[in-house]
Amino acid sequence: MQFIMEKPRKALRIVRTIRRKSEGGVYKMLPSPRLLMWKGRKRAKHIFLGILALVVIYVLFLTFDGRLTFQPYMSTTTFYVAYPGNYTIIMDNTPVCRTRNPFLVLMVPVAPRGVKFRHTIRRTWGSERTVLGQRVDTIFLLGLPSGEETEQQQELLFWENEQYQDMIQSGFLDSYRNLTIKTMFMLEWLVKNCKNTSYVMKIDSDMLLHVPNLVKLLLDPITPKHNYMSGLVWWHSQVLRNPFNKFYMPRHVIAEPEYPPYPLGMAYVMSMDLPEKILSISTEIKPIYIEDAYLGMCLQHLGIFPTDPPDTDLYIVKPVHPLSNCSLTKVIAVTTTGIDLMNIYWARIQDSETTCNLTYYYYYY
Ligand SMILES: *[C@@H]1O[C@H](CO)[C@@H](O)[C@H](O)[C@H]1NC(C)=O
Ligand SMILES: *[C@@H]1O[C@H](CO)[C@@H](O)[C@H](O)[C@H]1NC(C)=O
Ligand SMILES: *[C@@H]1O[C@H](CO)[C@@H](O)[C@H](O)[C@H]1NC(C)=O
Ligand SMILES: *[C@@H]1O[C@H](CO)[C@@H](O)[C@H](O)[C@H]1NC(C)=O
Ligand SMILES: *[C@@H]1O[C@H](CO)[C@@H](O)[C@H](O)[C@H]1NC(C)=O
């Protein structure tokens, strides 16, 4: 406050000094009003340009996702994937659904290079075989490796699968843009092999899955046995029209402003009658590269709505880490930041000391 009061006084003193000096014969030029105005305008222009630059940087920051995907002249085919295609099967010798009859199959799409994730999942939530008396099996889904040393990578995959027999691989190139192909391949495989299975969950390799909580929900009489697809349901997912965005979709591919409702691709569960229904309707809908939204489009054509989980905290997509013991023991699937956190959370939910203090929980929420 004092500082602000002092400033005009000081300025006044300087003006008086200048005036006195010029009156006393020493010539001192005062800045003309026009010069002052010009300076003011110049400053305003600088401020304006500065703000503009900040806005541009902010917009770029919002739309930037590791690489610039600005491709305004992308042809229509860019937004579709090559499915169906006669992809060859490279690896498929798992006993799951063949000599074993699981109640629930966990399908994990993973990049060929994601061996660390596969090992971690095999050691943690993928290691659970019998949960609440129900058989649970885990399978990894892969396409072909790309980049450098593809042959060497493929050799390692063969070797890894020889040890664990839990990988299936098909002959399309494994890339983010081909995720829909992977999902459709998964559905085909399930229809062919898992007739006696009740549910399937598709779950990403960076997730922590609380298998007992999932099985508990699936065994609950409130859970439908048919036409059931659940997860973190996006009821009003906007079709993004910003060409900078990773999920850009032009109007001439999808005219509607919103996608039909669908559970987020990170983790969704469905009853085993759905894969066949989705596959049969999929011949009528051109597959787009956004796999979860595409499944939503298939569901809509089937006249089936996804089911919200009974509690919104069961699936968490953007958690604030570290999660409290209470939210960890209540969750079904939660995004992690990587292998380390997955291990820590897994150890914590195994520990009988980790309990959810319900009185505490309901008191505060
Ligand atoms: C796939 O292969 C079968 C026979 O192997 C053939 O009849 C069919 O036309 C092929 N489909 C495509 C899309 O290439
Ligand atoms: C898979 O994706 C890559 C690039 O992302 C593409 O070149 C390839 O043609 C796609 N399709 C198949 C069937 O591999
Ligand atoms: C299906 O699974 C049940 C147990 O879950 C088993 O009793 C039955 O024999 C199985 N049927 C076939 C055809 O595998
Ligand atoms: C969370 O659980 C762990 C056991 O894994 C326990 O040691 C710790 O004290 C618990 N933290 C809180 C805040 O209750
Ligand atoms: C639950 O938390 C409340 C408040 O912190 C505490 O008073 C109570 O003893 C706790 N109950 C159990 C079973 O830990």
Image (spheres, rainbow, N blue to C red):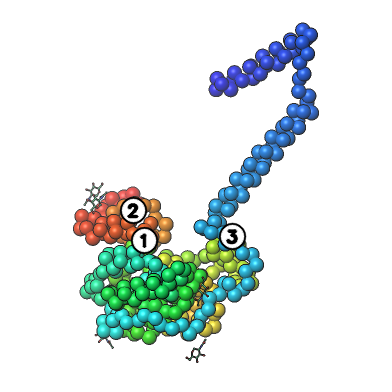
Report the residue that reaches farthest toward the top: 24
Q: Return the disc, 2 or 3, that comes first in the chain's sequence.
A: 3
* Disc number lying in front (2 or 3): 3
Q: Which residue is mark 1?
A: 334
Callout 2–callout 3 Cβ contact below 8 Å? no
Taking depth in this image into account, of 317 and 118 the one nearest to the observer is: 118
Q: Residue at x 66, y 38 (%)?
A: 47
Relative to 331, does residue 179 appear above or below in the rendering?
Answer: below
How far across and down, in percent of the image, does residue 112 sit? 40, 70
Relative image position of residue 294 (x, y in whole percent): 50, 73
Look at label 2 and name its amino acid.
Leu
Query: Mark 2 = which residue?
Result: 323
Closest to the observer, 203 or 31 = 31
Q: Which type of secondary structure does the marked residue at label 3 adopt? A: loop
Residue 256 lies in quadrant: bottom right
Taking depth in this image into account, of 307 and 49 the one nearest to the observer is: 49
Amino acid type of the residue tagged 1 in the rendering = Val
The residue tagged 3 is: 244
- Mark 3 or 1 closer to N-term? 3
Q: Amino acid at mark 3?
A: Phe
**Nearer-the-camera pick, 165 or 365:** 165
Label 1 CA crowd tier, 10 Å (few <14, some 14–19, many 20+): many
How much space separates mark 2 and mark 3, taking CA atoms? 33 Å
The image shows residue 204, relative to residue 189, as above or below, that is above
Query: Residue 101 appears at what percent x and percent y?
Result: 27, 81
In whole angstroms, how far apart are the C-alphas of marks 1 and 2? 10 Å
